[in-house]
Image (cartoon, helix red, strand yellow):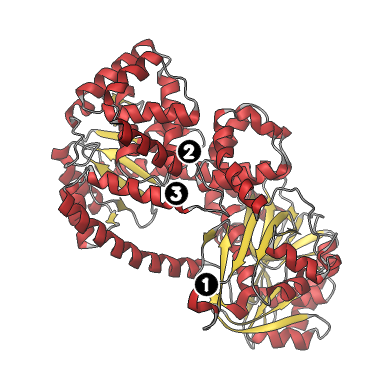
């Protein structure tokens, strides 16, 4: 069963009661919420995601609550509890959905050390994954959204999950958050994509989420080997260039980009080594999305 | 809601069941696993369960997601143990061959001596025991090699140096692990007053001759003093598991028990020993010789105090259901915290100290909340 098959009323009741068990990629998340407005947004973004039937083992327990007292009426807030613990300061009530998204990302990054976790977008074509590892501001999400709009399968916008045992990439499709200028860039570039509401004044500025393509959710259990490592660098006005880089350099960049390279010790070293050995490694500088996509399509066609 | 509450109370015992009778885990239902994983993570015992299951060769029989949690927990443990070993390595390097008798305590000792409590054990600091007369020069050596004081408030500095059995913690900014340097095992003003010289004299050197650990009976006594008299019950159950492990491991040698009671008596540590025996037996079903339990009874407090301690200790040791925390636990934790300070300083001083700590903690919590919010992605 997926979330859309659950009538709105029933979903709200479940969220307020024993919680919804949502499947996202390899993870099962138990979600509780008693927060006005969250249910509709959650339903919209996760409509095609599978609901796991009880009883099940949840990997994460996320609970959204409204702090009581005066804050209920005066500038109401929302608080996220991860496994019963407060880890963030409260957000304005209207930002419940982005808070949920960040909270879940944070929980995954802190806990899922059975994987090498890269801070990377991942998209698949022809059975192989292109990793786009980058820190915020380099246009990773924008490029990822643009590729997905042109038919690439979305693996993940935020996490490159590499399985330690076999080096395969594990999909973790979720809504893609676009920030500030990239919202309009993608609206213009791919008018067909479905955006949610814009959240203004978050700590990353304005954020709007793209709905995860249904096909990507439906294939969330299909892993794939890595094929290409492309470090994106958006810079206004620069000519397009796709420069191969040497494996040692790619290794260092990738190790630095990982959430848990250090933690994994030898296994981290081996996983990153295997990745750079199996991939062609490039730095992509771009200012024009169309040009960039043509170039990347050429790369993967050959 | 009723169902949830019931679930909550059932939840509180599940971790103890898993620790006492690991075999029972193999029959757990998904709902029980869900709760066990959460509770074990909160009490920092997830890695421990992973090791137990692994040693029993039963990992493959578990649900895939449980295996993943165990795998991740072991990654975490391995990392922290490696970090601790490296910190100790760096301390030895900083000493450049100076002959300071370094006695490792607690986690660091268990890991480097390869003792059973190290299995799956997390640790967040390295604890060392150094003779008091070498304390200053040792601290200076570390400061000269880049370690820095973690507690920068002047009050904290003074508090540690005047009242405590350890220096204000140090840490190296490149690594971040805390180093706690002790010169004895209980606070200076405490009613317990074991002789640190005996501890050094009878300590045992490891394969690396520059490092030492306490002899078995002292290791147990220190672990007991730390757990029942330091007032930090955050990792209480984990520390109790350490004690149960040590009892089981050292208890195989015939003379251990006799020596243990004798040492506790001569060092004035019968009270903490009494508690260690009582609660490892009650909560973790440790197998202890009756004669030893009887002999340590000499250290028991009066009836009413004992009943109070039973209640408080069980309230802080038996983990809560994460979704249904009870006030009782927080209250018990606070009472034990106050008790530990009561044992360590005169009443006037105590009131003043608790008030100051309250204010400082409140300030700190604000900063922590802010940093963690910024650290998120």
Dot 3 falls on which chain? B
Instruction: Where is residue A128? Give x, y as percent.
Output: 80, 59
Instruction: Where is residue B161? Give x, y as percent.
Output: 17, 50
Dot 1 falls on which chain? A
Indicate the secondary structure of the residue bearing disc 2: loop
Question: Given contact means CB atoms under 8 Å apart, are the residues at marks 2 and 3 in contact?
Answer: no
Indicate the secondary structure of the residue bearing disc 1: loop
Dot 2 falls on which chain? B
User: Residue placed farthest to the front in the image?
Assistant: B304
Q: Tell me if residue A249 can be seen.
A: no
Residue placed under numbered mark 2 in the picture: B121
Q: Judge from the rendering whether residue B332 lies leftward or rightward of residue B168; answer left or right.
A: right
Q: Judge from the rendering whether residue B263 lies leftward or rightward of residue B55; answer left or right.
A: left
- Measure the alpha-carbon separation of dots 2 and 3: 24 Å
Q: Nearer the viewer, residue A219 or A89?
A: A89
Question: From what the image shows, is residue B63 above or below residue A53?
Answer: above
Mark 3: give few (<14), some (14-19) or many (20+) Cα within 10 Å.
some
Tell me the mark number nearer the camera, choosing from 2 and 3.
3
Q: Quadrant of the N terminus of chain B?
A: bottom right
Residue placed under numbered mark 3 in the picture: B329
Residue placed under numbered mark 1 in the picture: A68
Where is residue A225, by image quadrant? bottom right
Q: Tell me if residue B346 can be seen.
A: yes
Where is residue B288, by image quadrant? top left
Where is residue B277, by image quadrant? top left
Q: How many marks?
A: 3
Identify the residue shown where x is 81% and y is 80%.
A193
Mark 2: give few (<14), some (14-19) or many (20+) Cα within 10 Å.
many
Q: Nearer the viewer, residue A37 or A23?
A: A37
């Amino acid at each position: 069963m997926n979330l859309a098959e659950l009538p709105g009323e029933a979903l709200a009741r479940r969220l307020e009661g024993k919680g919804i068990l949502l499947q996202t990629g390899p993870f099962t998340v138990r979600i509780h919420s008693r927060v006005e407005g969250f249910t509709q947004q959650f339903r919209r973004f996760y409509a095609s995601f599978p609901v796991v039937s009880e009883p099940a083992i949840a990997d994460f327990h996320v609970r959204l609550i409204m702090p009581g007292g005066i804050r209920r009426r005066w500038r109401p807030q929302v608080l996220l509890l991860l496994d019963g613990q407060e880890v963030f300061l409260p957000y304005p009530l209207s930002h419940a959905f982005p808070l949920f998204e960040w909270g879940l990302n944070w929980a995954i990054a802190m806990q899922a050390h059975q994987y090498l976790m890269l801070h990377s977008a991942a998209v698949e074509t022809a059975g192989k994954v292109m990793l786009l590892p980058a820190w915020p501001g380099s246009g990773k999400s924008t490029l990822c959204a643009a590729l997905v709009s042109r038919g690439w399968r979305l693996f993940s916008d935020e996490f490159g999950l590499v399985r330690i045992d076999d080096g395969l990439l594990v999909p973790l499709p979720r809504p893609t958050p676009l920030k500030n200028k990239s919202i309009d860039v993608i609206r213009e570039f791919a008018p067909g994509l479905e955006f949610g509401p814009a959240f203004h004044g978050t700590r990353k500025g304005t954020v709007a989420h793209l709905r995860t393509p249904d096909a990507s959710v439906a294939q969330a259990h299909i892993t794939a080997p890595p094929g290409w490592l492309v470090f994106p660098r958006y810079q206004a006005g620069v000519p397009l260039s796709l420069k191969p880089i040497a494996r040692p350099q790619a290794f260092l960049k990738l190790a630095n980009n990982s959430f848990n390279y250090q933690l994994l010790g030898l296994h981290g070293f081996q996983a990153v080594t295997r990745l750079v050995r199996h991939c062609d490694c490039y730095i992509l500088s771009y200012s024009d999305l169309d040009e960039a996509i043509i170039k990347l399509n050429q790369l993967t066609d050959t | 809601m009723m169902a949830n509450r019931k679930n909550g109370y059932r939840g509180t015992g599940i971790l103890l069941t898993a620790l006492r009778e690991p075999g029972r885990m193999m029959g757990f239902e998904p709902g029980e696993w869900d709760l066990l994983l959460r509770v074990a993570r909160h009490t920092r015992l997830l890695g421990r369960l992973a090791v137990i299951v692994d040693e029993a060769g039963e990992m493959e029989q578990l649900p895939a997601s449980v295996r993943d949690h165990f795998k991740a927990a072991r990654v975490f443990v391995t990392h922290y143990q490696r970090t601790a070993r490296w910190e100790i390595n760096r301390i030895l390097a900083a000493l450049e061959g100076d002959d300071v008798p370094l006695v490792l305590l607690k986690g660091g000792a268990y890991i480097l001596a390869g003792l059973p409590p190290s299995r799956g054990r997390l640790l967040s600091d390295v604890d060392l025991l150094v003779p008091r007369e070498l304390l200053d020069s040792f601290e200076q050596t570390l400061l000269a090699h880049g370690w820095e004081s973690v507690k920068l408030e002047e009050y904290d500095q003074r508090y540690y140096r005047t009242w405590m059995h350890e220096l204000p913690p140090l840490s190296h900014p490149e690594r971040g692990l805390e180093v706690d340097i002790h010169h004895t095992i209980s606070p200076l003003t405490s009613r317990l007053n074991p002789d640190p010289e005996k501890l050094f004299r009878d300590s045992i050197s490891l394969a690396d001759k520059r490092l030492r650990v306490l002899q078995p009976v002292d290791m147990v006594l220190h672990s007991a003093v730390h757990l029942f008299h330091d007032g930090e019950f955050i990792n209480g159950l984990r520390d109790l598991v350490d004690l149960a492990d040590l009892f089981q491991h050292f208890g195989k040698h015939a003379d251990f028990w006799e020596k243990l009671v004798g040492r506790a008596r001569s060092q004035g540590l019968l009270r903490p020993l009494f508690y260690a025996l009582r609660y490892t037996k009650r909560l973790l079903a440790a197998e202890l010789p009756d004669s030893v339990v009887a002999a340590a009874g000499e250290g028991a407090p009066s009836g009413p105090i004992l009943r109070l301690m039973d209640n408080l200790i069980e309230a802080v040791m038996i983990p809560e259901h994460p979704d249904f925390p009870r006030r009782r636990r927080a209250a018990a934790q606070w009472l034990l915290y106050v008790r530990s300070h009561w044992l360590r300083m005169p009443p006037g001083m105590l009131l003043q100290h608790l008030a100051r700590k309250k204010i400082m903690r409140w300030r700190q919590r604000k900063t922590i909340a802010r940093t963690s919010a910024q650290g998120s992605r």
